[in-house]
Image: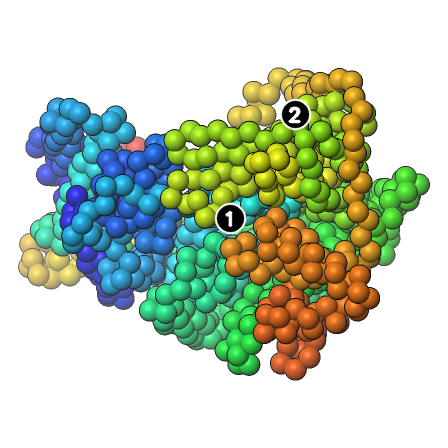
Amino acid sequence: MSSETSTNRSSFRPWHFFVLGALFAATGAVLRSSNTTPAATILVSLAIGAAALCGLALLRTLWPLVAVDFDVESTAVSNRTRSAVEREKQLVLRSIKELEFDRAMGKVAEADFQEMTTRLRSRAISFMRQLDSDTPGYSDLIERELQSRLASQSLSAGPMDQATEAGGAECTCEVCAAVNDPDARFCKYCGASL
Amino acid sequence: MASLGSFLLLAAFVVCAYAATSSFIGGRQRSARLIESSIGAFYLLTALMTMASAVIVHAFVTENYSIRYVDRYSDSAQPLFYKLTSYWGGLDGSIMFWVFLLSVFGSIAVATNRERQRELIPYVVTVISCVQLFFLLVMVLNKDPFTTYLTQVPADGRGLNPLLQNPYMVIHPPSLYIGFVGMTIPFAFGMSALITGHLDDSWLRAVRRWTMFAWIFLSLGLTLGMIWAYEELGWGGYWGWDPVENAGLLPWFTATAFLHSVMVQERRSMLRVWNVTLVILTFFLTIFGTFMTRSGVVQSVHAFGEDPELAMMFGIFMAIILIVSFGLVIYRLPLLRARHELDSWASREAAFLLNNWILLFCAVFILFATMFPTLSEAITGERLTVGPPFFNKWMLPIGLMLLLLTGVGPLLAWRKSTLSNLGNQFLWPITVAFITGGILYALGFRVWTSGVCFVLCGFVLGTIGQEFIRGTRVRQEATGADVLTSITGIVARSHRRYGGYIIHVGIVLMFLGFAGEGYKVEEQVLLSPGQQVEVGRFVVRHEGISVRDDGQKQMITGRLRVFEEGEEIGMMYPARWFFRKHEQEPTTEVAIHRTISEDLYIVMAAFDMQDQTASFQVTVNPLVNWIWFGFGIMALGTVIALLPEQAFSFAASKIPDGAAITSLLLLVLVASAPLHAQHVESAQTVPTVPRSAIERELYHEIVCMCGTCGRKLIGECTCGTAAMMRDEVSLLVDQGKTKEDVFQHFITMYGSQEPLAMPLDQGFNRLAWLFPYLLGLSGVVGVGTVALRWSRREAIDTPLPAGISNTGDAQLLARLDDELRDLD
C-alpha cells in the first residue's frame, strides 16, 4: 500500500532514478575511457549497472524498516490449510489418472485396480467435501470476525452506533438472504434492490 | 579497482550477515518488516556480488597484474575468451564465483516462491545466507581474490594453466558449479520445512525443478570433464576415478537417488525422512567435494594444492551442517512418519528403494575409496594408491545392477504387481534382451562384462519402447487421434514420466559407450618417418614432425597418414604444445578420428627432432561417442521433464504432421555422410611387440610415479617415467618374475605401496577390501528392516465404505469424473 500511495502522486518510481543514474554514469565512463578495449568498456558499464542494482536493493532493504505505513496485513499468514487440501486433492486426482493409465497399459490387476481406485476416489471425495464445507466455514469466520470488530468499535464509539447495529441486522436481502450495509439500496451479492 | 573489489566483498559479508539474522528473527517473530527487509538484503547481496564479479573480470581484461589473482591466472598473450574465464580458474576466484552463483540462484528461488511458500521463505533466506556467509568469510579471511602486490607489480601475468586453456574446460567448471550450487536451494527449502514443521509435500514441489536443473548441470559438468580428460589429458580414457572427478560424482549419485525417491513420497507419502536425508546429504557432499578439491587433503591432478587453514574452516563448517541438519531431522521425526505401508516386494516402491540403496552405496563406496589413501596415511603412515582397477571392480557390477533396475522399475506397478501382469510386462523386454544376446553371441562378441551390458541395454530399451508403444496405443484408444498426436499427448500429459524415460534412453546409450571399453585396442610404438603400425582395422603411417610457434606456445606436431582397411581416410596430427612460462608441462593435443562406431585416438608421447622419430600411443576406442550422444538425449529428456505444462499444449498444436519423421530422416542422412576414401601404398610396417598376459595385466595394476599425471596407469600414461616403468616391468617379466615379485620390487623401490593401483589385501588395507562388503551387507539389513517395519505397519487410511449411495455422493462423484476429464 505504501508504495502505491508514494508513487501515485508522481509516476516517478525509485527504480527510474537508479536506471537513469546508471545510464548517465555508464555514458560518462565510456566517454572518459576512450583508449580501452570494448570488453573493458562493457564490463565497466556492467559494474555500473550492478551498482545501480545495489542502490535499488539497498532501498528495498531499508524501506520496510522505516516506512510508516508498511502494509503488514498483506504478509499475514495465508490460508495454507485450504491450499494444502486443494493440492492434496489434485494429487489424488492425478494418482487416479495415473492408475487408470497403468491399468490400460496392463500394469495393474483388475482386482487391485478396483480396490485402489475406490480408495483413491473416496479420498478425493472426502477432500472435495472438506473443501466444500470449508468455504462457508471461512465466510462464517470472516462474518464473526467482522461482527466482533464492529461490536468492539461500537462499544468504544458509544451509544450512537446502536441504531446502525439494529439497522444492519435488519437489512438482509430478500432474494439471497445476504447481509448488506444498513444504507445499501441494492444487494451487494445478487444486485436485487432492497 | 582492487580496493573497490575488497570493499564490495566486505560489504557483501556484512549484508549477508544482516540477511541471515534479520530473516531468522523475522521468521521467529513473524515480523513482516524484518522478513521483507531481509529479502531486500538478499537481493542486495546478489547485486554486490555481480558488481564484484564485473570488477574482477574487468581487472583480467585490462591486465591489471597488481592483483595477485590476475597475475597468477592470466597473461597478456591469452585470448580474450580465456581471460574472461580465468575468473574461475583459481581457488580464490572459484570461491567468489560460487558465492555469486549462489546469490543469483537464491534470489531467483526466493523471488519465484515468495508468495507460494510464505512460511518457508524467511528460513530459506536464512539458510542460503548462512552458506554464503561461510564462503564470504573464507574469502574475507584468507582467500580474497582482490589481494594486491604491495611492491613490484609484475609486468606480465604467469598465465592460466595450459591444461585449462581448452573450450571444454571453460564450460566444465561453471556447469559443475551450477550443479553444486543449485543443490543448495533444495537443501535450504528442506531445512526451512524442518524448521517450520510444514512438512507436507509442498516444499518438495518447490525444489523438484531446482534439483532437476542442478542435476542436469552436474551431469553436463561431469560429461564435459570426461570429454576434456579424453581430449586434453590424452590417456585414451575419459574417467580415471580421480578424486576431483569423484567429488563431482558423489552428489550426482545422491541427487539421482533423491529425484527417484521424491516420486515415492509424492505418490505414496513414504520415504519422507529419507528424502530430507538425501537432500541434506547431497548438499553436504557438494560442500565436501569442494573441501576435497580445495584443501589438498587428497592428491589429484587438478586439486588446488594444500591449505590446512582452509581445510580446518571447511571441517568446522561441515560439522555444523551435519549436526544442525540431522539434529533437526531427529527433532521433527514424529512429523515425518510415513503414511503408507509397503504392500509388496514386487512393486515400484520396492524397486525405488533398491535403486536408492544402490545409488547410496555408490556414493559411500566412492567416498570411502577416494578418502582411503588419506585415511591410511593418517593411521599407518603409508602412502598408497586406490586406482581405477579398484573402483572398476565394484562399480562395474553395481552399474550393471542399476542398469537392470532402470529396465525393471518402469515395468512394476505401484503397490504390487501380480504374477500375470508381471508376465505380460516382462515378456517383450526380456525377448529383446535375449535377441540382443543371441545376435552378439552369433557375431562372436566374447567379453562377458560388455556382453551383459549390451544385453541389459537391450532390455532397458525394450522396456522403454514398450512403455511408449503401449502408452500411445492406450492414448489412441482413448482419443482416437493418430500416432504422432498420441505420442505428443502422452509425453505432454505425463511429461515427467516420459521425460524420465528419455533420460533413461540417454543413460542406456552412455552405458553402450562404457561397454565399448571392453573392446579397446591400444598400442605404443616408436616410429621413424615412413614406418607404419597396424592397430585394429587401422594402419597409421608416420610422415614426419613439424614445429610451429604462434607467440603463446610452441607446437610440435606429428604428421600421420591413416588407412582404414586399406583405404586412406586422411591425415591426423597429434601434437605437444609448449606454452610460454609453462614449458615444463607440455600439453598433449590428441588427434581423434571420430566415427559412430569407434574412435581412432592418437597421442604423440615423445619425439626426437633430429631423426624425426616419435613414439605414439594409438588407441581404438569403440562406441565412445555414444557417451556424449547419450548425454545429449539425457539433456533433452530433462528439458521435457522440466518444461511447464502449458508449453506442451502449445507444442502439440504447433507441430505439423510428419515433422518427427522428417527430422529423423534428416538425422540419419547427416549421420551417414560418406567418408573420404583413397588408395594405399605399401610401406614398412613396424610389428607391434606382442606382450604376455601378465605384462598386460601389470600395465594396468601399476601407476605412473612421475607426480604430474595424477597416478595414471602405466599402460595409459604417455610420460617418460611411465615408459621407463613399463620397460622395467617387461624386464622383470622376462626374468621370469611373478606378479608378486614385481609388486614387491616396486614397493621396495618407492618405499611404499604407492606405485600399486590397488592396495595389497593385507594389514590395515584389508579394510579397503572389506568395506564394500560391509557396506553392502549393512545396506541389505537396513533396507530389509525398514521394509519389514513398513509392511507390518497398520494402514492409516483404512478402507472407506465402498458403497457410495446417497445423492450427495453421486453428485460429488459426477464432479469428480468431470475434474478427472479436465485433467487431460
What's under tag 1, amino acid-wise? Leu
Placement of the N terminus of chain A among the 4 image quadrants = top left
Q: From the viewer's perspective, is residue B184 above or below residue B672?
A: below
**Residue for badge 1:** B218
Q: Is residue B219 visible?
A: no
Looking at the picture, tell me which residue is in the foreground, B820 or B17: B17
Image coords of residue B698 (percent x, y)? 73, 61
Image coords of residue B359 (percent x, y)? 63, 60
Image coords of residue B211 (percent x, y)? 49, 50
Mark linked to residue B636: none
Q: Quadrant of residue B616?
A: top right
Q: Secondary structure at mark 2?
A: strand
Tell me the crowding category of disc 2: few under 14, some 14 to 19, or many 20 or more residues within 10 angstroms, Cα based: some
Furthest residue toward right: B442
What's under tag 2, amino acid-wise? Met
**Residue for badge 2:** B571
Image coords of residue B160 (percent x, y)? 38, 44
Q: Are marks 1 and 2 in contact (CB under 8 Å)?
A: no
Looking at the picture, tell me which residue is in the foreground, B378 or B120: B378
The reply, left or right, for residue B318 in relation to residue B663 is left
Q: Is residue A39 visible?
A: yes
